[in-house]
Amino acid sequence: MTEHFLNYDFCDGRGCAKGNTHEYSHGAAPMNAVRPIAVKLDQDTRDRLKRLADAKDRSTHWMLREAVAQFVDREEKREAFRQAGLQAWREYQATGKHVTHDEADAWLAKLEAGEAAAAPECHD
């Protein structure tokens, strides 16, 4: 008899399992099932986390989940920015089209002054 997926410790695309077993209960296992993960922290960090959690009237579990979520969001944005830079570099290498420093600086000065200014055109 298959229990509801929330009663399991582990679910993946093949099914669900309870505890340290490899026996699955096959059925509809949600792809976004929440699964525990262990993080080893030194005592000083644990104490600091506990103090912050107490000050914010939150659990340490909530604090860790929030910290990981913020970290992942930030790192995804950094990686997207890095990939955009690499793509721009590949495009420049392929076409040679560019904007000079002086052109970019003049455009940014207009924007800083509150003027509506179109970005300069790329050229060879």
Image (spheres, rainbow, N blue to C red):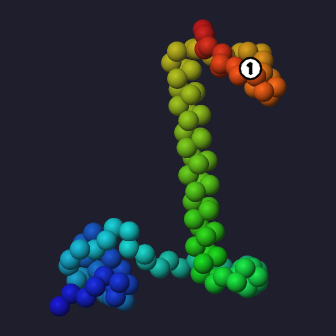
The residue sitting at 43% across, 77% down in the picture is 35
Locate the C terminus by quadrant: top right
Q: Farthest residue toward the top?
A: 124
On screen, 77 above or below 26? Answer: above
Horizontal and vertical percent position of residue 58: 66, 82
Does residue 46 appear in the picture of this structure? no
Between residues 18 and 62, which one lies in front from this camera angle? 62
Query: Helix or strand or loop: what does disc 1 sit on?
Result: helix
Residue 46 falls in image quadrant: bottom right
On screen, 37 above or below 91? Answer: below
Instruction: Judge the density around disc 1: few (<14), some (14-19), many (≥20) Cα neighbours within 10 Å.
Output: some
Horizontal and vertical percent position of residue 64: 62, 75
The residue sitting at 61% across, 47% down in the picture is 78
Image side of residue 24 versus residue 117, left or right: left
Amino acid type, label 1: Trp
Image side of residue 15 versus residue 64, left or right: left
Q: Which residue is mark 1?
A: 107
Horizontal and vertical percent position of residue 89: 58, 27
On screen, 34 above or below 78? Answer: below
Image side of residue 23 versus residue 82, left or right: left
On screen, 19 above or below 32? Answer: below
The residue sitting at 63% across, 69% down in the picture is 67
Horizontal and vertical percent position of residue 85: 59, 34
